[in-house]
Amino acid sequence: MKRGAIRTVLLGDAQAGRLVPPSGQTAHLTLFVAGAMAFLAVFALALSLAAGRLADRWAEELARSATLRINAPAEQMAAQTEAALKILRQTPGVARARALGREEQAALLAPWFGAGLPLEDLPVPQLIEITAAEPAYDEAGLRLRLQAAVPGAVLDDHSRWRRPLVRAAHSLRRLGWISVLLIGGATAAMITLAANAALAANAQVIEVLRLVGARDGYIAGAFMRRFTLRALIGSAVGTGLGMIGVMLLPEASAEGGFLTGLGFQGAGWLLPLAIPPLGALVALAATWAAARRRLKELS
Amino acid sequence: MIELDNVGYSYGGGELLREVTVRLAPGSFHFLTGPSGSGKTTLIRLCYGALQPSSGQVRVFDTDLRGLDRDQMALMRRRIGVVHQDCRFLDHLPVADNIALPLIVSGRDVAAEAGNLAELMKWVGLGARADALPPELSGGERQRAALARAVIMSPDVILADEPTGNVDWEMSQRLLRLLVELNRMGKTVLIASHDLGLIRAAKSQVQARVLRISDRRLQLAGADL
């Protein structure tokens, strides 16, 4: 693309714009498409970022933690817990081992049984939270030692359900980014179609301009300016509405889990602001390519 | 100014022109005549690069047109005023803007040339019609507007394709006088016309040579016209 053409578009040549007759319907459709696509792009972006955060958090939090569950008769519970903790503290590769208190265990069960659960009266197993060090402990060895000393202990290292979750979050993020790319491609395709329609409808105008000595860059500029501005305005409105929509989503909370984590955080809010300029750029390139193709057919 | 050297033009298997050699000298006045469909419009279009010859060479301002890229072609066209058979205006813009179109697309300051534009419009008798849209103009007014647009850049060459095609005798005389006047100002003029009466009328005003397309070849017609 020549610099002159870019300058024509950016600085604007009101004269050039006037040479192409106004095109009501195409203009509105382009605005609408750009707006709708930007709106969708905001959500795809929010989804990707949220999924990425989720995957990172899950991977980070779950990677190093395991749970030891001790099922024992009430009178042996304290002794077995003590024995298990002792083994764990002696095991190389265990950074921390901590028995959960009564309140903590009650909080974990509260969503299922309601608050005010008389935990003392129920045969609830004791949970021990294990945080692995780097390098981590030998899992098989630990199991054997626990089996010998603490018959009621069951080691659960979380990896069984952690991996599919992290994998799912990663796929979700990938899908989000693919959606963003597809939205960009679809925008380019639709603006190309609209530009082609406008160029075809104005074939006579283009021919006259060419005959009186207008350069290709000048003619293409008249169309590019139009479609670029429409895409910019449309996607700015769409992005604005999309961001308001994301803002109105409920705050991230423990109760809502993943769904309320959607949206942008911190600097992430700056990312959707790139959508309007990118949309305008896509429109610029699409119109330029379409105009170039069309003009080549004229002598 | 414009030289055609052994030019041939064929389209879709049919040969329209062959072995055309002609030279339009600066300040000359030529008529191009021949029956309908003999290739007058094609020859005019070859002269300003709207068509590429199938064979031979077209030189404009001593430059081979084949060597020009698209931008150079656009710049070359600013030096040639063309009056098209069907005029070709931008129908959504008023006549004044249509006449100023070559100025606009070449990036000239139209406001600074407003005086010239008004004078030119008066010269072609359209002073009162500046704000009219092209579809509102009569045939004669359209032809005069097309002529005004062709000369606004003060070109060295004026090519007119049937400029008196659908106007009455009086109007065609008026257009002819305008073209003769331009020729006196030193412009090279080529008019394609099948109107022999017009050509005879011109011969009393200007030293015009007549080129005739006959049997796909271009001949210099004798003084018998």
Image (cartoon, helix red, strand yellow):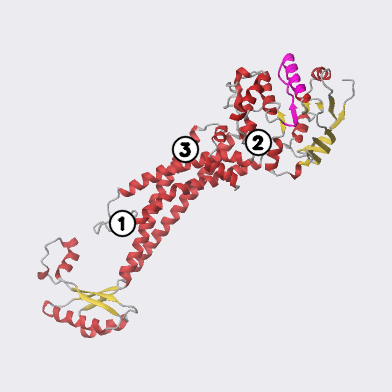
Q: CA distance from mark 3 to mark 2?
A: 28 Å
* Residue A85 left/right relative to B189: left
Q: Which residue corresponds to mark 2?
A: A210
Q: Amino acid at mark 3?
A: Leu
Q: Which of the two residues, A122 or A234, is positioned nearer the viewer here?
A: A234
**Where is A232 relative to B114, above or below?**
below
**Where is A293 relative to B133, above or below?**
below
For image coordinates 36% across by 56% down, the residue present is: A267
Say which chain tag 2 marks. A
Element type at marker 3? helix
Q: Mark 1: few, some, or many residues within 10 Å (few <14, many ≥20)?
A: many
Q: Which residue corresponds to mark 1?
A: A261
Labels 3, 2: one chain: yes
Q: Amino acid at mark 2?
A: Arg
From the viewer's perspective, is the residue at label 2 or at label 1 nearer? 2
For image coordinates 81% across by 41% down, the residue present is: B55
Element type at marker 1? helix
Q: Which picture quadrant has residue A97? A: bottom left
Residue A99 in the image, given as x and y percentages of width and height? 19, 75
The answer to whether residue B139 of the structure is visible from this angle is no
From the viewer's perspective, is the residue at label 3 or at label 2 nearer? 2
Residue A223 in the image, given as x and y percentages of width and height? 55, 39
Do labels 3 and 2 touch, CB within 8 Å?
A: no
Q: CA distance from mark 1 to mark 3?
A: 34 Å
Stretch of the chain drawn in magenta: B155-181
Labels 1, 3: one chain: yes
